[in-house]
Amino acid sequence: MSIIIPGTKLAGAASHPIDQSIRFNDDDSPELTKTYSGAGSRTTQTFSVWFKLGNTQSSSGFNFYNGGTGTSDTTWSGISIYDHKIYLQGYSTNWKITTRVLRDHSAWYHLVYIWDTTNSVASERVRLYINGQRETDFSTDNNPGASASSGIGQAAKHSIGNQSRVVGYSYADAYMAEIVFIDGTAYGPENFGEENDNGIWVPKDVSGLTFGTNGFWIDGRDSGDLGDDESGRGNDYTASGLAAHDQMTGESPTNNFCVMNPINKHSNVTLSNGNLHALGSGTSISYASVATISLPSSGKWYAEMKYTNASAGEYPMVGVFNNSVRALINVSNSPGGTGASDAKDIGFGADGRRLENGTNTEPWENAVSDGNISALAIDMDNKKIWFGHNNSGSFVWQASGNPSAGSNEANTIDFNTTELVLGNGHYSTSEVHWNFGQDGTFGGTETAQNNSDANGVGNFYFSVPTGFKAICTKNLGS
């Protein structure tokens, strides 16, 4: 198994498994807010969050957490990501800006921010940890004065995922889990995470921590109240721009699902909804977008897709790209299309065609109408692939296929690489909503049917064929 983006670490076994996250989709203006009636400690505090980046590109950013409405360093403070760098901010002073950039959209990160101005050592007053390691290399490195107040912690508005006041950032586009604020204690990262046997930084149970007056622990376990505080302090946050379908069941720091890749796509493709919704541009050329996790060289794997704007002339193609031989960025490409004679990949069109290594079989089977859902089942052990959809009113594997029995496959291909990735080609303004097992609602457009895979993992719309599994770290043995 390989990951497209270099540097990715998969989540391993954890003593504190997390069952869900909250998806912040910037198009929906999402945020969690609370206006405190009284102040807590403004000299000693800790913030911790696990996050997986969404469609976060260069020259864009958002606030993880911030508080205050004033125009000074003591009346507004925030923890942000901008241009892939972490910013620790007052209103007019950037205390710290990391030199390091966080560009891996396939991985979960853990951030711990400590504000401790009671510390007599100036360099210890603002501290930042990523995945348990302290950040010490900053392009901007300032320290607040002794006993300086943070804007966070005052009797004012606080926001997760947006600004408590408007100073230039967008809404968050990310998955967040285990969002914790500690009022009055400077806790190190070892209180929130630990290394497992494989040396991977994984979550710890935070329920025993002292949260303080304005502290909270938001984990998104209640889909109807995503801002519910589990700390026992009653500091619930109010959700806006977030819905029940933004609770991502299973997508978490302890089970990382495949998503589409903001880095390995055509520039005319826009991703949203946690990198699960791919939208093509208004041209007639096929533009590609592909997934973050490569298909393992063995095993049986399953994924679902919902089409929007899949009318004649705007049909998308879904299937398998050979990432090792195809140039996918800024060139016309579809899975199975022309451009690489040794690609040995395959695609299925919503218009009923099949493409294999540039050979167009048209028509192959029944077309998929706008608004319907299709699925791919891929047996890497026997090099077989099946394609099906519910265009007839109930789900049917095309060409009388039966993945559970291993029969009547759409095709048998000598997949000769370990860099095969699921993906799609867009024609005009076609849209593909992917579900790798973390969103059986397809962005809230369907009622989840709660079907899981052979290991009891995932939330799929259709029944998963016998022996097939979701592409996620729990199934990849990581």
Image (spheres, helix red, strand yellow):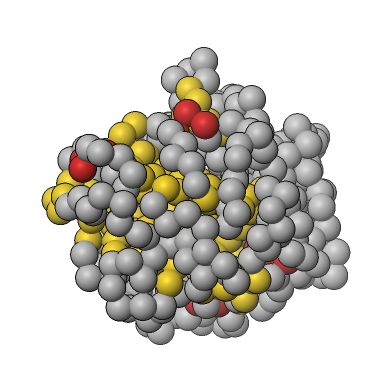
Residue found 46% across the figure and 37% down from its top: 187
Q: Residue 107: percent from the left, percent from the top? A: 45, 43
* Res. 186 image quadrant: top left
252 or 275, nearer to the observer: 252
Counting labels gives 0
Does residue 327 show up?
A: no
* Residue 373 as seen in the image, left or right of residue 60: right
- Camera-side residue of 41 and 309: 41
Q: Position of residue 231 (x, y in %)?
A: 68, 48
Q: Quadrant of residue 476?
A: top right
Q: Is residue 231 left or right of residue 3?
A: right
Instruction: Tell me the residue at 75%/61% (across/down).
Output: 223
Judge whether 420 appears above or below 436 on screen. Answer: above
Residue farthest toward the top in the current orientation of the protein? 197
**Screen quadrant of the C terminus:** top right
Residue at left offset 78%, top offset 36%: 456
The front one of 257 and 424 is: 257
Q: Residue 267: x percent and y percent? A: 31, 68
